[in-house]
Structures are given as structure tokens and as C-alpha cells.
């Protein structure tokens, strides 16, 4: 494995028009009501958080993709093609879970043809090792909390606002990695003290 590569964690999640119910505040005697459309339309999101293996000054990088419906192997290859452009031909070690679309015959064949990409698998049943999981949690607790959109575009807009919020704070992606207990060498980014 090339040590001068981006270590990129990728994960998918789903959103729908049904709101993520969260506790909130309101004036006494005025209980907030959510009036969602009873519609099961869903969208899927793919997030890829990258950390450079030898140069934390390059910062963490977030690549995001949203589409109606779900991801299959062809959809994930499309995401990876966009990620190739995002990383402009730099080496990437992609770490993801054991979802069947991640390790299908077509995905493995496509991956074998990519000189910029190495695929690695997370241990089974270990979502706590993927820093994209706390990213999804952050989005669902802030921008998507109690959102009763009329259209999937409303959910997409709120999700995009959350991605901008995360990108605007360079410490957040590092906190997601710290939450997993994993480290990238050097063990801390230069903008954080060693005791944090």
C-alpha cells in the first residue's frame, strides 16, 4: 500500500419525507406539530471522508453524493468515478463495509482496473469504526431534525446545508475520526493540541 495516499471512508445512508423526530422546545401550551406527507419516497446519500495519510495540513476532505432511490453497484461506481475527479488522480485507499454492492463481482472487476484506488474492508458489524457514521448522525440531528418536507428536494436542500456546515468547520471531520478511536499518522491534525 502506498503510504502517500488519502485514507477515505465511505458509507451510505437513506433519507425520506418522513421526519427524523427529535426533541425540541416551544412556548408553554403550544405543542409543536409535524405534518409530514405520508409518502415513502426515499433518497440515498453517499459520503466519503478522506484524511491524508502523511500530511494533515492538507485537511480532511468530504465528498458527498445524493440520489433518489437506493445505491447498487452501478450507482456506487458512478460515485467512485466522481471521487476520482475529486481527488484528481491522487492515490486513494477506500475503506468501506461489507455491503454486497461494495464487493460484487462487477465492483471488484472495476476496482482491479483502477490504478489510483485500493479497496479495503471494515471488520464485519463495526459501524463504529467508520467516521461517516457520526457525520450522518450530525446531519440527522441538526438539518434533518423534525423536517417535514413536501418534496425530496426539501430534504436534499437541508442535507446540502448540513454538508456546507460540516465543510465550513475543518475540526468537525477530525472529530468524526476521533469518535471512532482510529488515528491517521501523524496522530493529530496541526490545528489541534495533543491533549484534545
Image: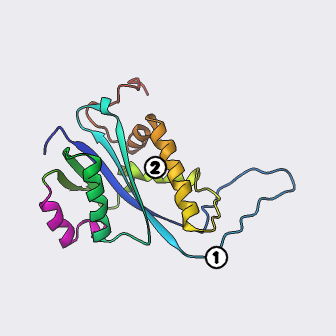
Q: Horizontal placement of 157 versus 192: left or right?
A: right
Residue at the disc numbered 1: 38
Task: Give the magenta range.
Answer: 96-114
State the mark number for residue 87. none
Inspect this view and state whether residue 154 appears: yes
Q: Nearer the viewer, residue 53 or 58?
A: 58
Q: Is residue 137 above or below residue 177?
A: below
The quadrant holding residue 120 is bottom left
Q: Is residue 78 above or below residue 166?
A: below
Looking at the rendered image, the quarter that the C terminus falls into is top left
Residue drawn at the location 26% of the way across and 31% of the way down: 55
Nearest to N terminus: mark 2 or mark 1: 1
Q: Position of residue 113 (x, y in %)?
A: 12, 61
Q: Dots 2 and 1: beta carbons under 8 Å?
A: no
The quadrant holding residue 44 is bottom left
Residue at the disc numbered 2: 134
Q: Horizontal placement of 94 versus 46: left or right?
A: left
Q: Nearer the viewer, residue 109 or 85?
A: 85
Residue drawn at the location 59% of the way across and 68% of the way down: 151
Amino acid at each position: 500500500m502506498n503510504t502517500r495516499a488519502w485514507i477515505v471512508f465511505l458509507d451510505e445512508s437513506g433519507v425520506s419525507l418522513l421526519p427524523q423526530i427529535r426533541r425540541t422546545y416551544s412556548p408553554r401550551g403550544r405543542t409543536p406539530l409535524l405534518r409530514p406527507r405520508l409518502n415513502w419516497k426515499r433518497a440515498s446519500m453517499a459520503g466519503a471522508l478522506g484524511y491524508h495519510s502523511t500530511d494533515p495540513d492538507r485537511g480532511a476532505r468530504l465528498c458527498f453524493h445524493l440520489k433518489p432511490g437506493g445505491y447498487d453497484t452501478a450507482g456506487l461506481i458512478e460515485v467512485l468515478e466522481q471521487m476520482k475527479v475529486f481527488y484528481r488522480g491522487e492515490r486513494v485507499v477506500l475503506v468501506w463495509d461489507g455491503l454486497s454492492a461494495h464487493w460484487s463481482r462487477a465492483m471488484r472487476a472495476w476496482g482491479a482496473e483502477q490504478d489510483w484506488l485500493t479497496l479495503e474492508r471494515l471488520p464485519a458489524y463495526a459501524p463504529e469504526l467508520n467516521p461517516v457514521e457520526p457525520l450522518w448522525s450530525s446531519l440527522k440531528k441538526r438539518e434533518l431534525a423534525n423536517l417535514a418536507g413536501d418534496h425530496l428536494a426539501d430534504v436534499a436542500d437541508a442535507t446540502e446545508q448540513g454538508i456546507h456546515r460540516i465543510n465550513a468547520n475543518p475540526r468537525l471531520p477530525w472529530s468524526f475520526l476521533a469518535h471512532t478511536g482510529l488515528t491517521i499518522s501523524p496522530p493529530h491534525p496541526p490545528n489541534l493540541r495533543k491533549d484534545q
